[in-house]
Amino acid sequence: MSLVNAQRSAGFQYWLHKIKLFLGLSRTSHALLDVATPAMAALIYLGHFPNSYIIVVGLITAFAGYTAVYALNDIVDIGIDRQRLSLVDKPQAIFDVDEVFVQHPLAQGLISPAHGMLWFGFWALIALIGAWLLNTYCAILFVISACLELIYCKLLKITHFKIIPSALVKASGGVAGVLAVDPEPSMGFIVVLVLWLAAWEVGGQNIPNDIVDMENDSKVDARTTLTVRGLDESVFFLVTASGMAAFGGIVIYFLAGEGLRWLYIFGATFFGYYLIVKPAKAVYDNPTKQTAGSLFNRASYMPLMFLLLAAVSCA
């Protein structure tokens, strides 16, 4: 009996390890935070909770979509990731919400390319079906987002303007959330939402990550804002975009649904300062990997915190 239990335990540990590898491929720790983006956007836009059908289908679709797109990033970047890993002497002692699970398991050979493609295909199909059930435009937007992610990866060694498709991919999640609850939304709200989320991606995610990875990016000839424009200009763009992101989270209130109460303004001001402005100022004062990593990690929680804020404000 003990032998049978031992075999079961070994089997369980094996599959648990495999699951962790695939979760690492999709950076699930970060994807779960990003899932809050469409929910946050929809709730702010409506000013009240949507029906249960949209909530359930929307959450499944959002999880599948982010899981697929993050996996696509590693699949397309397998060559460059292998090059990075071969040049890194030791891992950086900086906590990164992207790396809670195994980092780049595909490039490390822990997952085969075929299995990686199957994982991506499965979740992409779930996302496409779910998006179609919510709104045809959501399905189209998911395909566009996947294509933008592909373009972003392919531009790594070509131009630092790859930051544009990256910003649009992050903003598309919020737009999809709004389209799920209104097929003909206010264009004013959509414009502010896109600018807000794009600024958050540029100032709170992309450029901070460039600073953290500056040495590795230089070794593989990656063209990022930092490697092309230098540290001073990169920090200027980071601070400017971070300020826009913090401001955008407040401005969008004035275009939101009527059910969103004044409590949102105070919460948005606090979260904008604590999650974005304060750590961005730390990067401005002392632009190091540590301060940039802290900004990246804090800013990653912005969609979740604003979702909770909107939920409380609508209650």
Image: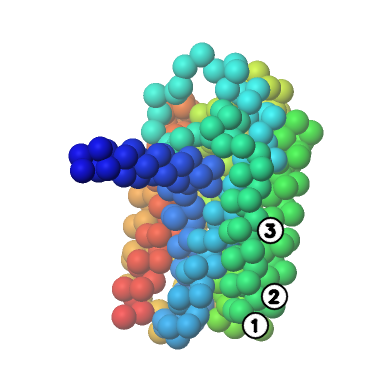
Residue 214: quarter of image:
top right
Q: In this view, does 41 lie to the left or right of 264?
A: right
- Decide which of 54, 311 is in the foreground and name it: 54
The circle drawn on residue 145 is 3
- x, y percentage for residue 306? 40, 63
Which quadrant holds the C terminus?
Answer: bottom left
Give the farthest residue toward the front.
1
Query: Which amino acid type is marked by label 3?
Result: Ser
The amino acid sitting under disc 2 is Tyr
Q: Name the residue under label 1.
A: 183
Contact check, label 3 and label 1, Cβ < 8 Å = no
Residue at figure coordinates x 71%, y 44% from the top left: 152
Element marked by disc 1: loop
Q: Say how the picture is coloured.
A: rainbow
Between residues 147 and 165, which one lies in front from this camera angle? 147
Mark closest to the chain's N terminus, 3 or 1: 3
- The 10 Å Cα crowd at callout 1, few under 14, some 14 to 19, many 20 or more, is some
| Disc 1 + disc 2, Cβ < 8 Å | yes
Q: What distance separates the C-alpha of mark 3 from that of mark 1?
A: 18 Å
- Which dot, 1 or 2, sits closer to the camera? 2
Label 2 crowding class (10 Å Cα cut-off): few <14, some 14-19, many 20+? some
Answer above or below: position of 174 versus 153. below
Q: Assess whether mark 3 and mark 2 are in contact (beta carbons under 8 angstroms).
A: no
Q: Residue placed farthest to the right in the image? A: 158
Report the residue marked by disc 2: 137
Q: How far apart are marks 2 and 3 (CA)?
A: 12 Å
Pick whichever of labels 1 and 2 is earlier in the sequence.
2
